[in-house]
């Protein structure tokens, strides 16, 4: 059966019943149909003094284009912890429509390890991303309206873009103001995908609605004639932006196919943003479960690095365990095997690809200060010989390995992983940041590039150097760096899978996100508005003769 068929084969419980099992009474819920709800701030305040559970971070090696089942393993692990008698809560990101209709598909897990209702979550859900899109575009409209009525703030340069939650490369650069009205000003503009909007990042890093409003007001939207920043609050728009997000800021709850609680809230991309669900959702989950399973986007060089250096730094989180997900296919892919041949037994490619996994483990353990365990997302055609070879290689460096079969077996397929995570979570560990707040921006970039990616050097464009100077002059040099690079490689070249020769990181642009309170560093050929593949997933998605959606995977 397909993922969507499996999801429909399970009878879901009403979300009010799921919530009640975790002590969330109906009076604290805003219900969206039978199976989705938002939790009110009143409940968050009620449980804020509860003891925190243990936080478990799920990350991965560098993926193949279709991903390695990180979300699937995270869901299966949470279900497995509940199977062995531990109270576990999931805290995940909301899917973006871009990947759903693009190449990667949905982001609600797979097989018998899914959050549901999967079609709703993958599509419009409770409207959070639409609210963020509207807020982003209201701010853009207010800027152009200000220009139309005389530009009293003295904009010389506008840096705020519009957004849309779809992959559409033709919108990366556009020209606006073409209506030929007397005062209309033509100018170049562009679109980001909504999950790359600074408002999405702010949404996920805010402590509460007041902090949200403060951060929205602090967004830098442009610069004046003497290169001073112009803020959203100068346009008196932060209040309206907050109003658009007042419902969205409350966390969403759904369930796994095994009827366990999942909080799904916020969805910034991990290669062009910080790639974690909201701080509000994670902190709420910690008050509700003995264990909280959360994930960071893409590989441990991107998602986990930003989870540690941005989210954990800002929210004072300290994960007890870090699960690094891998597949034999991805290991062979990073060992030089062609993607079409990664299902074939190939010990040589596997041995080379294991070096990618070892580097991620080294980062998790020695750079981030976290306790690692490797979870192999097992496929039915995986070679026993290759599995044994991998186990032996990991035993040599003292790393636990667990084979998971959550796609086929749900929580029962991750019992071993759950038991090992519980055991590892008893160990003391203290999170380590790769750089200090007081390091200058170039030092932060250098530390991540050299210590995490393994780069030999950094090359800056002239534009990037000018932007760094301006950011530090404006007092934002103490912000964390959010490095935007390809997810497929430790380098900034998506085709350099082995990274077995010295390489440099190429910094083409640096942008301060003053509301989010981090600095985005764009490398290589990264785009903040993705494009569709030659054969998009959208071609397969339709309504069948029974009125059911098919084709989402």
Image: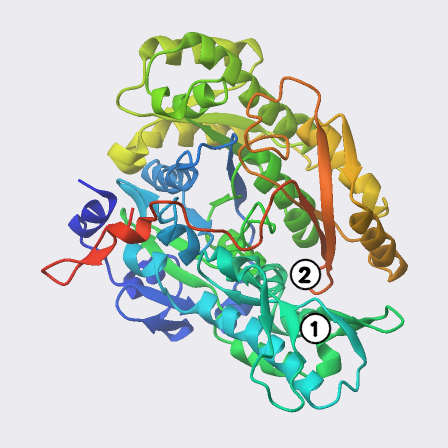
- Residue 523, quarter of the rendered image: top right
Name the colour scheme.
rainbow
Which is nearer the eye, 139 or 204? 139
Query: Given this view, does label 2 or label 1 mark the residue nearer the observer?
Result: 2
Q: Which mark is residue 469?
A: none
Q: Secondary structure at mark 1?
A: helix
Residue lying at the far front of the rendered structure:
180
Which is nearer the eye, 40 or 392? 392
Which is nearer the eye, 525 or 374? 525
Q: Is residue 435 visible?
A: no
Q: Position of residue 212 (x, y in %)?
A: 63, 70
Q: Which residue is identified by label 2?
A: 516
> Residue at horizontal 48%, vertical 72%?
131
Q: Residues within 10 Å of mark 2 (few under 14, many from 20)?
A: many
* CA–CA distance in space, label 2 to label 1: 10 Å
Above/below status of 212 relative to 1: below
Q: Is residue 15 left or right of residue 164?
A: left
- Residue 82, quarter of the rendered image: top left
Above/below status of 176 relative to 95: below
Q: Secondary structure at mark 2?
A: loop
Q: Is residue 258 left or right of residue 228?
A: left
Q: Which mark is residue 214?
A: 1
Image quarter (top left, top right, bottom left or bottom right) of the N terminus: top left
Above/below status of 137 relative to 372: below
Q: Position of residue 308 (x, y in %)?
A: 65, 42
Q: Residues within 10 Å of mark 1 (few under 14, many from 20)?
A: some
Q: Earlier in the sequence, mark 2 or mark 1?
A: 1
> Residue at horizontal 73%, vertical 56%?
511
> Residue at horizontal 45%, vertical 14%?
350
């Amino acid at each position: 059966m397909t993922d969507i068929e499996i999801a429909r084969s399970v009878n879901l419980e009403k979300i009010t019943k799921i919530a009640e099992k975790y002590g969330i009474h109906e009076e604290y819920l805003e219900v969206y149909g039978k199976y989705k709800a938002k939790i009110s701030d009143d409940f968050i305040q009620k449980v804020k003094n509860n003891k925190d559970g243990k936080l478990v971070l799920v990350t991965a090696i560098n993926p193949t284009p279709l991903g390695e089942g990180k979300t699937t393993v995270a869901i299966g692990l949470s279900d497995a912890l509940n199977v062995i008698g531990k109270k576990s809560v999931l805290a995940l990101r909301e899917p973006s429509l871009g990947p759903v209709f693009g190449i990667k598909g949905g982001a609600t897990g797979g097989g018998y390890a899914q959050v549901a209702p999967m079609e709703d979550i993958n599509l419009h859900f409770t409207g959070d991303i639409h609210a963020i899109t509207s807020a982003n575009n209201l701010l853009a409209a207010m800027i152009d309206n200000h220009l139309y009525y005389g530009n009293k703030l003295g904009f010389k340069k506008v840096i705020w873009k519009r957004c849309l939650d779809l992959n559409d490369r033709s919108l990366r650069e556009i020209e606006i103001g073409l209506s030929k009205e007397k005062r209309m000003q033509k100018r170049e503009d562009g679109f980001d995908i909504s999950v790359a909007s600074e408002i999405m990042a702010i949404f996920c890093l805010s402590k509460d609605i007041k902090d949200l409003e403060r951060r929205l007001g602090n967004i830098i939207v442009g610069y004046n004639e003497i290169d001073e920043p112009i803020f959203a609050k100068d346009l008196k728009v932060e209040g309206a932006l907050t109003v658009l997000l007042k419902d969205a800021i409350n966390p969403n709850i759904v369930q796994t196919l095994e009827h366990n609680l999942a909080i799904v809230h916020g969805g910034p991309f991990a290669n062009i943003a910080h790639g974690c669900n909201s701080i509000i959702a994670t902190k709420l989950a910690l008050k509700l479960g003995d264990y909280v399973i959360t994930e960071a986007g893409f590989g441990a060089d991107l998602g986990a690095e930003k989870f540690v250096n941005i989210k954990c730094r800002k929210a004072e989180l300290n994960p007890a365990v870090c699960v690094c997900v891998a597949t034999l296919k991805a290991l062979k892919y990073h060992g030089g095997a062609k993607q079409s041949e990664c299902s074939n037994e190939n010990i040589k490619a596997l041995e080379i690809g294991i070096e990618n996994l070892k580097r991620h483990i080294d980062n998790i353990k020695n750079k981030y200060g976290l306790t690692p365990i490797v979870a192999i997302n097992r496929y039915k055609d995986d070679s026993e010989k290759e599995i044994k070879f991998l186990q032996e290689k990991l035993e040599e460096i003292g790393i636990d390995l667990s084979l998971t079969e959550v796609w086929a077996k749900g929580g029962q397929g991750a019992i071993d992983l759950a038991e090992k995570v519980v055991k590892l979570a008893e160990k003391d560990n203290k999170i380590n940041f790769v750089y200090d707040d007081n390091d200058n921006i170039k030092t932060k970039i250098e530390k991540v590039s050299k210590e995490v990616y393994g780069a030999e050097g950094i090359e800056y464009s002239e534009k990037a150097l000018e932007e760094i100077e301006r950011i530090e002059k404006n007092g934002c040099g103490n912000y964390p760096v959010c490095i935007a690079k390809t997810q497929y490689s430790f380098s900034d070249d998506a085709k350099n899978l082995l990274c077995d020769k010295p390489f440099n990181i190429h910094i083409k642009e640096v942008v301060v996100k003053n509301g989010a309170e981090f600095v985005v560093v764009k490398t290589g050929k990264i785009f903040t508005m993705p494009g569709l593949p030659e054969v998009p997933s959208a071609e397969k998605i339709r309504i069948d003769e029974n009125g059911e959606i098919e084709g989402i995977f």
